Image (tube, rainbow, N blue to C red):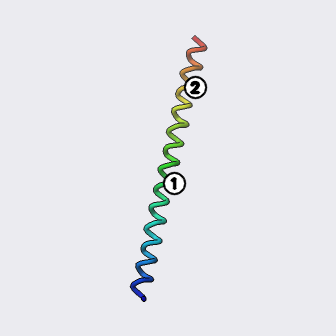
Amino acid sequence: MKKFIVALIFGVFGLSLAGCNTTRGVGQDIQAAGESIEDFAEETREDLND
C-alpha cells in the first residue's frame, strides 16, 4: 500500500509539471502572436505616414 501511495504522489507531481509546461507554451504562443500583431501595426503605420 505504501508503494502505491508513493507512486500516486509521483504521478500527480508529474502531471502537474506537464500541465505547467503546457500552460507556459500557450503563454509563449500568445505572446508571439501579440508581437506579430505589433509588428504588423508598426509597418502599417509607417506605410500610412509615407
Verify CB contact (< 8 Å) between mark 2 and mark 1: no
Residue 37: x and y in percent read 55, 31
Q: CA distance from mark 2 to mark 1?
A: 27 Å
Mark 2, Cα crowd under 10 Å, few <14 / some 14-19 / many 20+, is few
The disc, 2 or 1, on the residue closer to the chain's N-terminal end is 1
Residue 15 located left or right of residue 47: left
Residue 11: x and y in percent read 43, 72
The residue located at (58%, 25%) in the rendering is: 41
Q: Nearer the viewer, mark 2 or mark 1?
A: 1
The residue located at (45%, 83%) in the rendering is: 5
For label 1, the SS is helix
Q: Is residue 11 above or below residue 1?
A: above
Q: Amino acid at mark 2?
A: Ala
Q: What residue does disc 2 label?
A: 41
Q: Amino acid at mark 1?
A: Thr
Q: Quadrant of the N terminus?
A: bottom left
Residue 19: x and y in percent read 49, 60
Residue 50 located left or right of residue 19: right
Q: What residue does disc 1 label?
A: 23
Classify residue 49 by image quadrant: top right
